[in-house]
Amino acid sequence: MKVGIIGTGLQANRRLPSIEQHISCKVDAITGLVSEEAKNISKIYGARYIMNWERLVTDDKLNIIVICTPPYVHFDIAKTALEAGKHVLCEKPLTMNSADAQKLVTIANKNNVLLKCGFNHRHHPAIQKAYQLVSNGAIGKPITGRSLYGICGRQGCEQEWRSNPNYAAGGQFMEQGIHVIDLFRWFVGEFDSVSADIATHVFPIEPLEDTATALLHRRDGVTVTIHSSITQWRNRFRFELYGTQGYVEITGLGGSYDLQQLRFGKRNPDVPFSEEIIDYRGSDKSWVSEWNHFMDAILHHAPMIGTGTDGVAASHIVESAYLSAKESRRVLLEELKL
Ligand SMILES: NC(=O)c1ccc[n+]([C@@H]2O[C@H](COP(=O)([O-])OP(=O)(O)OC[C@H]3O[C@@H](n4cnc5c(N)ncnc54)[C@H](O)[C@@H]3O)[C@@H](O)[C@H]2O)c1
């Protein structure tokens, strides 16, 4: 399979090696806004440099397009690629709004190609193991969840595209919080309402937020809370799910988020507390695992997780959270039409 990639920044450089490690894949074409950078990276990977995304996505030789640009251009690129019959992996958030993301899902279905949203967190080994435990009933019925996901905002981050509402689909909740929204949806199913508060405490990035706190609620009583911030002053990831019979807790993602660790414990009031702890040492495996999963879906029609539809749903929850914060009330997800 020949792969074309758009963007030469952080995400492209994470994804390029994971594409190349797959026995059936070759990065064949690269483009980005900074042509010198794109030319240099193309040389490293023995790929063709193509002068703009419009030419790249319609190139007959390519089978798969990977979109690693800021969100403002995701829709145009993905739409053109899907209409040209290419499979697409697009970084989160899929588009600037969930209605556009839904259009991409429709276009992908119509053209019989796959659209994957870059929710790589589903592919971290601790998350995969926790998902296996939860879906096998090891913690009973999930009841409550709690998550925090944040970073120490970079000096000068207000100059980046992430701080500009013309380029970014939202603030910190859309940019990073969306990953844990996606995880909670995956683990416990669809939510019905959201209450949220957002604030811009430190970085001059208004109208975007540097901090968000949200409570997602299901009609069956399951609630989860999410705190996501760039004012955390230390990178941290924590994802916890408690069920009627036990719990799973994941801390860390490797790298600057510290060792990835899974804790699994059972409800048993009659014995001393004990839990199983697994340390996932080593580098971040999620990129390779996500790519291999995508390839299994393309080559062998294996069921895919982190689909375009998941991308739509997660963006829709963030948008509902923003409405909740704006109007200081709980928002039913059905209020915002796609
Ligand atoms: N999954 C994750 O953990 C994760 C982490 C960071 C970023 N992201 C997402 O990845 C995407 C890219 O983020 P990044 O951190 O790599 O950004 P970045 O600024 O490092 O890189 C963006 C790249 O896009 C290119 N670009 C911008 N506009 C373009 C255009 N019109 N045509 C062609 N190329 C264009 C730029 O030249 C640059 O190479 C965003 O959607 C972001 O939300 C995901």
Image: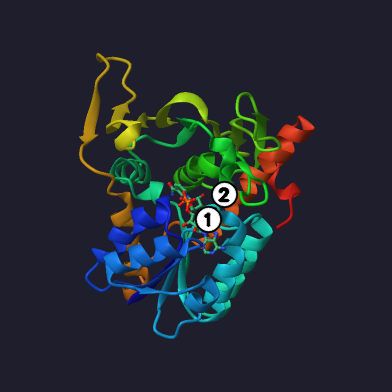
- 203 left or right, relative to 298: right
Which residue is painted at 57% across and 79% down in the image? 110
Instruction: Please identify the quarter of the rendering in which residue 40 is found.
Output: bottom left
Quadrant of the snapshot with the C terminus: bottom right
Instruction: Please identify the quarter of the rendering in which residue 208 is found.
Output: top right
User: Which mark identifies residue 197?
Assistant: none
> What crowding class fits label 1: few (fewer than 14 Cα within 10 Å), some (14-19), or many (20 or more)?
many
Q: Position of residue 116 (x, y in %)?
A: 46, 63
- 257 left or right, relative to 99: left
Q: Identity of the amino acid at label 1?
A: Asp
Pick the front one: 69 or 241 = 69
Give the secondary structure at mark 2.
helix
Distance (Cα) linking label 2 and label 1: 6 Å
In the image as oriented, which residue stretches furthest toward the bottom? 60
- Name the residue beneath numbered marker 2: 314
Q: Report the label total.
A: 2
> What crowding class fits label 2: few (fewer than 14 Cα within 10 Å), some (14-19), or many (20 or more)?
many
In the image as oriented, which residue stretches furthest toward the front? 36
Which residue is painted at 52% across and 55% down in the image? 310
Q: Is residue 145 above or below residue 69?
A: above
Asked whether residue 295 is in view, the answer is: yes
User: Which mark identifies residue 310?
Assistant: 1
Q: Identity of the amino acid at label 2?
A: Ala
In the image as oriented, which residue stretches furthest toward the right? 327
Which residue is painted at 37% across and 30% down in the image? 245
Callout 2–callout 1 Cβ contact below 8 Å? yes
Quadrant of the snapshot with the N terminus: bottom left
Give the secondary structure at mark 1.
helix
Which residue is painted at 53% across and 75% down in the image? 82
